């Protein structure tokens, strides 16, 4: 119906168009509906005439369904991680396992290492596993004040156990203060060591948040990470 109306408007809006018989060419809505139903009738009829599935067909579908529940061993898997922590005065600021001198640090159950949490989540995500908060819940006293390298080592272990190794990793830290450039190489070296990876496949970027929102007002710190895992 919409097509007929649009066509009608198009022709009527064009006084130079030489198609005087356009009204006779247009199909009334009921005729279009009839044609649509007619064109699908063989399909509708064939659906009605499909015999019920045999027992062997049902078993075959069940086998297929059971097989599809096994996760496929893909050649590559991509994962994304994000983390954000509130900054509070008087707490240590630890990023990528490096103590960064600052007047405030991350408020967290563990050491609040925003970068490592984010990398762990990216690896777990690539493996299709639950996130860091589910594997290391902040209600568990074992993780109170824990170094986040513990979470990293577990994520790397799970990665190898699943038959994958790191292809490459790209991380972005977002914080207004302090400047991260003096610490970037130390952080990157730590990441490489924990991941057992060559520096050429571990990239780290840092940027401010243009003094906007909590990140830009030095009230929080955040990180994004993308990882590519490759089948070993
Ligand atoms: Zn975190």
Image: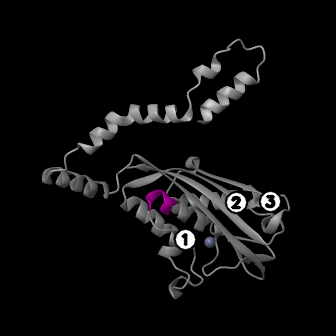
Local SS, label 2: strand
Query: Mark 3 highlights which residue?
Result: 209
Mark 1 and mark 2 lie on one chain; the one further toward the N terminus is: 1
**Label 1 residue near ligand 1, CB within 8 Å:** no
Question: Would you identify the image quadrant in which residue 190 lies?
Answer: bottom right
Please state if 66 lies on the left or on the right of 219 as rendered. Answer: left
| In this rendering, position of residue 45 left or right of residue 116 | left
Give the residues in magenta.
123-128
Reply above or below: 26 against 139: above
Relative to 21, 44 lies left or right = left
For the residue pair 224 and 51, the one nearer the viewer reads as: 51
Which residue is depicted at the point 34% across and 52% down?
72
Q: In this view, does 5 lie above or below 183?
A: above
Which residue sits at x=58%, y=36%?
1
Query: Which mark is first along the chain, 3 or 1?
Result: 1
| Residue at which label 2 appears | 173
**Disc number for residue 149:** 1
């Amino acid at each position: 119906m919409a097509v007929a109306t649009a066509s009608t408007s198009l022709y009527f809006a064009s006084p130079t168009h030489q198609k005087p018989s356009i009204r006779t060419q247009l199909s009334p809505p009921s005729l279009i509906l009839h044609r649509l139903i007619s064109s699908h009738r063989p399909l509708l009829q064939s659906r009605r005439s499909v015999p019920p599935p045999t027992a062997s067909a049902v078993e075959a579908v069940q086998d297929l369904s059971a097989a599809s529940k096994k996760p496929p061993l893909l050649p590559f898997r991509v994962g994304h991680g994000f983390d954000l922590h509130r900054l509070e005065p008087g707490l240590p600021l630890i990023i990528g396992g490096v103590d960064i001198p600052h007047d405030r640090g991350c408020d967290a159950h563990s050491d609040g290492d925003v970068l490592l949490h984010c990398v762990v989540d990216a690896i777990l995500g690539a493996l299709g596993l639950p996130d860091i908060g589910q594997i290391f819940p902040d209600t568990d006293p074992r993780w109170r004040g824990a170094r986040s390298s513990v979470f990293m080592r577990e994520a790397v272990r799970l990665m190898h156990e699943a038959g994958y190794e790191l292809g490459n990793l790209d991380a972005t830290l977002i914080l207004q203060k302090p400047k991260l450039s003096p610490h970037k190489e130390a952080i990157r070296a730590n990441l490489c060591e924990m991941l057992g990876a060559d520096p050429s496949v571990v990239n780290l970027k840092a940027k401010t948040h243009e003094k906007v929102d909590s990140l830009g007002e030095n009230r929080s710190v955040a990180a994004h990470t993308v990882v590519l895992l490759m089948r070993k």
